[in-house]
Amino acid sequence: MGELGKTSYVVLGMLRLGRRTGYEIKSLVDVSTRFFWTASYGQIYPELRRLEKLGLVRGRRDDSDGRRRRSYELTAEGGRALDDWLTSDEPLHIELRNEGMLKLFFSEPLSARERAELWRRMGAAHAEKRDQLEEIHPAAVASAEKDGHTMPLQVLDFGIAFADFVAGWCERMERETAEPLGAAGGRS
Amino acid sequence: MGELGKTSYVVLGMLRLGRRTGYEIKSLVDVSTRFFWTASYGQIYPELRRLEKLGLVRGRRDDSDGRRRRSYELTAEGGRALDDWLTSDEPLHIELRNEGMLKLFFSEPLSARERAELWRRMGAAHAEKRDQLEEIHPAAVASAEKDGHTMPLQVLDFGIAFADFVAGWCERMERETAEPLGAAGGRS
DNA sequence: CTGATCATGTAATTCGTTACATGATTCC
DNA sequence: GGAATCATGTAACGAATTACATGATCAG
């Protein structure tokens, strides 16, 4: 009875890039949208079956190179559903859960050292994410030049800038927290 | 059987600020941690009962001013559980779901106008969040000066800077997408 | 031949939201 | 008197993760 959820659109969107298996969709998600939207096998495989029943994708056995598998392609109706979502003006689902911020909020009773450590860990987590994204950046540039698809690159650039901003902020706060903070405007 | 989840710590953390009812905890969450961690009545009330059974909080009827209600306070053990969490070095749960980014990722087939509109809406959402946070900023400053609690203010400052950064980025991308983008470096 | 990767799925569980149900009190 | 807010809870549902189960193929 359920209509389409966000996961449905992840699947439809990935299938617009070409015929794919559930396994391939999951791999794509892991190297592209994972940083702002995830999906697990436990969602993807049932979702593909569901979308097929709805006529939005068409699956077929695809044992070409000896591997037993099932690949899917977008139907015309599936493409329309995807476009409807892309251009719909319903409020965007934006959600953030950050345990580091939560801890910091409650960290008043901790020592300055412990609070600095919290900022440090928050910063380290985001610096690591930034570095991971930067690693795949060259591949994204190459891919953008090859097929002219610039959006994945734009989104990646945003992800890098975003992670870098947070990392930088946390590092500044860490220093500020760790320093005794001389009363008069002392500079490091 | 479940150990403590993040929601448990939200409740414990709020109770460290003083004796509170479930209703008050929810109100506090809504004006403070909501932007990086939410909690609903459907979680808070059962959680309070559960924490009481675990001996981490102590509840009592508190019908002082005619209102039928039940307030809770942190036990010594509850305080210890909270501190253990605050100083534990398990990886921080950090999660981001952003439907705007997801749409942009798949928006290659759209027109430039439609893509610009997506950036605009992302930017507007974050600008609105920034403005909301800025509205409560003076109250946070006053409160920080009164009781010396600076962490809520630090977290709020981060939230504002963060939302502002995202909003600014999106606005730039919107302009860049909408403009025909003359081959030679034309300036607006 | 052995471990990594490819490949597909289900079941159980957890986490969280939303809707519902109820009723008192306070403010206008 | 009526609306807003205070106040507590439950039930149903939905979204997503994790663990489990299975087996083939490929690279070393």
Image: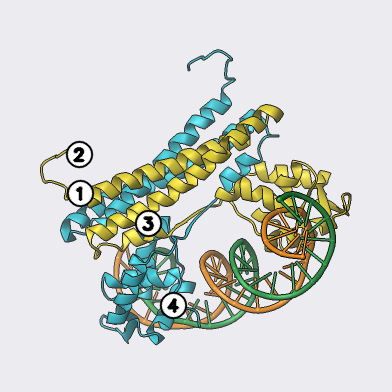
Chain colours: A yellow, B cyan, C orange, D green
Q: Position of residue A1 (x, y in %)?
A: 74, 65
- Viewer-nearest of discs 3 and 2: 2
Residue situated in front as seen by the camera: B141 or B93: B93
Is residue A15 toward the left or the right of residue B15 in the image?
right
Whole-angstrom CA distance, mark 1 to mark 2, is: 9 Å
Name the residue type under label 1. Answer: Glu
Residue situated in front as seen by the camera: B26 or A169: A169
On screen, residue A108 above or below B182: below
Which residue matches tag 3? A101
Ranked by sequence position, the earlier of labels 1 and 2 is 1
Circles 1 and 2, Cβ within 8 Å, touching? The answer is yes
Whole-angstrom CA distance, mark 4 to mark 3, is: 21 Å
Name the residue type under label 3. Answer: Met
Q: Position of residue B173 (x, y in %)?
A: 52, 31
Is residue B152 toward the left or the right of residue A21 in the image?
left
As helix, strand or loop, the secondary structure at mark 1 comes to: loop
On screen, residue C21 above or below A184: below
Whole-angstrom CA distance, mark 3 to mark 1, is: 20 Å
Residue situated in front as seen by the camera: A173 or D21: D21
- Viewer-nearest of discs 4 and 3: 3
Say whether mark 2 and mark 1 are on the same chain.
yes
Q: Residues within 10 Å of mark 1 (few under 14, many from 20)?
A: few
Which residue matches tag 1? A179
Is residue B43 toward the left or the right of residue B24 in the image?
right
As helix, strand or loop, the secondary structure at mark 2 comes to: loop
Name the residue type under label 4. Answer: Glu
Which residue matches tag 4? B47
Residue B67 visible in the current orientation: no
User: Mark 4 belongs to which subunit?
Assistant: B
Circles 1 and 4, Cβ within 8 Å, touching? The answer is no
Is residue A21 toward the left or the right of residue A101 in the image?
right
